[in-house]
Amino acid sequence: MKEIKVENRREGNILSRVFDELNEFCRARSLFILHYCTGCGAIELPPVMTSRFDMERLGVQPMVTPRQADILLITGYVSIKTLKRVMLTYEQMGSPKYVIGICSCTVNGGMYWQSYATAKKLDEYMPVDLYIAGCMPRPEAIISGLRSLIRNIELGESNNWKKYYENYDYYLGNQQKLFGDEWQTPVDVIGEAEHYGLVGEGTYGEHTEILQRVQQPLKPLEMRL
Amino acid sequence: MNLSQFEAWLADIDHRIAGVEVTASNLNKRRNRVDLPADKLVLFLEAVKGEASFVHLSAISCVDWIDDGEFELVYHLWSYELNQLISAHIRVSRDPGEYQSIYDLYRPAGFFERDIHEMYGLYFHGAPDMEKFILTEWNGIPPMRKEFDSEEFVEQNFSWQEYNPEWLKELVAEGGGVVIPCEEQRFSRSVATDHGIDQQHSNWSGCDVSSKLCRIDSKYRGGD
Ligand code: SF4
């Protein structure tokens, strides 16, 4: 007898499940990629976006602001200086958000493994949903990666963004190792975690203690003409 | 000044500025190498800019000769009238590592000198700005100095993960792929020391997906 594959859906209240599924169905069909590129892998994105491979048929399109974007594409090596900006961007994005690491450089440093200036493992600094390895991956691979992401979202399996809240101490620790103990971002991640009920075992720790000790209250920027 | 006048002028320059040594490149007629003592550089540049129309300083490069205890500075000058390049080579001591700025003669030198100061720690007196330039996050020793061991720095400050998916092993077993034996690699990395927490964080399904994608990728690469 032929086995019928049953997809693993989430359990729970039937009604909420219907809404969740509807939610995820819609979410998976309208993904905005933040227009921000690092490294050289970005060169494969124009063909992905334009008519040859046309990612818009999957409902994926570029977006100019992190506040309205769903996907953060890291398209190659990330220098320490860029990583700071990437972290600021990532924290500004609204949840649920997805990170795709394109290129070998985001997996383990790639050909820059021995450089003092680039971060090696992207997943030490933010949770990564998907890697598309290659130096650099072809548009076909990127499209295929986007399709896997869409599938994962539909099945409700792409929840890595929650890890950032649940293990904030770990990520913050790695950031502090590179940027120094004074490192702070305008986003109050701990506050958000508490607000949305995403506090996990790793939310607090020695590194968040350092943060709370050195944290300066944010001041509004001076407005001047 | 035309080209033949310039050649005569350059051949004569060592009579006017002591210690200047001119070597014309026999590969490329447009290149002139000039070696001179460090204290004669400004004199030389003034002459070359004022009399021979070398108004463009395209770069200053630096070489660290750690065994000689010296930095070599190379000033690349271009003339739009003669279409000639002069590279003026000087040597300055590595310790204490200071020299004078030529910002007053050539404005772009400000950037080059700031860059060299950042990468080699060579200080230029009279430069407009010797602050951090590109490596704003860097607090260690200047990374282009020969005594800085980039590999060791990476070992100490970053962790690493092996990327050796199954499909790659299959390819290698079939005789495909490029395998460079350890002793032929210029840098060989010792086996990554994964901390417990890294393991925990890198074990999600994403890795699996990526290996599949890579297979797709390599297929397309092979196909075209
Ligand atoms: S993996 Fe290759 S193409 Fe991609 S960023 Fe690194 S060096 Fe560039």
Image: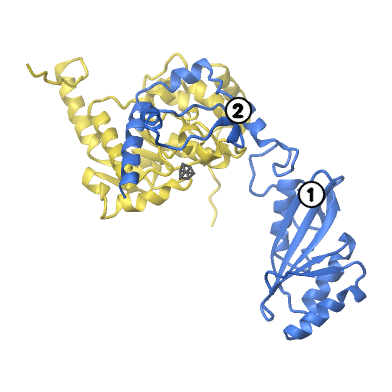
Chain colours: A yellow, B blue
> How far apart in space, not on screen, are marks 2 and 1 (Cα)?
28 Å
The image shows residue B111 at horizontal and vertical percentages of 69, 58
The image shows residue B43 at horizontal and vertical percentages of 87, 70
The residue closer to the viewer here, A219 or B218, is B218
Looking at the rendered structure, the secondary structure element under dot 1 is loop
Disc 2: host chain: A
> In the displayed structure, would residue B126 be above or below residue B97?
below
Disc 1: residue Cβ within 8 A of ligand 1's nearest atom: no
The image shows residue A86 at horizontal and vertical percentages of 48, 39
* Residue carrying label 1: B122
Q: Looking at numbered disc 2 in the image, what kind of residue is underneath it?
A: Lys
Instruction: State the quadrant of the N terminus of chain B.
Output: bottom right
Residue extending farthest left: A1
User: Do we see residue A219 in this rendering?
Assistant: no
Q: Residue at x 21, y 30 (%)?
A: A23
The residue closer to the viewer here, A116 or A17, is A116
Disc 1: host chain: B
* Residue carrying label 2: A177
Q: Looking at numbered disc 1 in the image, what kind of residue is underneath it?
A: Leu
Tell me if mark 2 has few (under 14), some (14-19) or many (20+) residues whose alpha carbon lies within 10 angstroms of its own: some
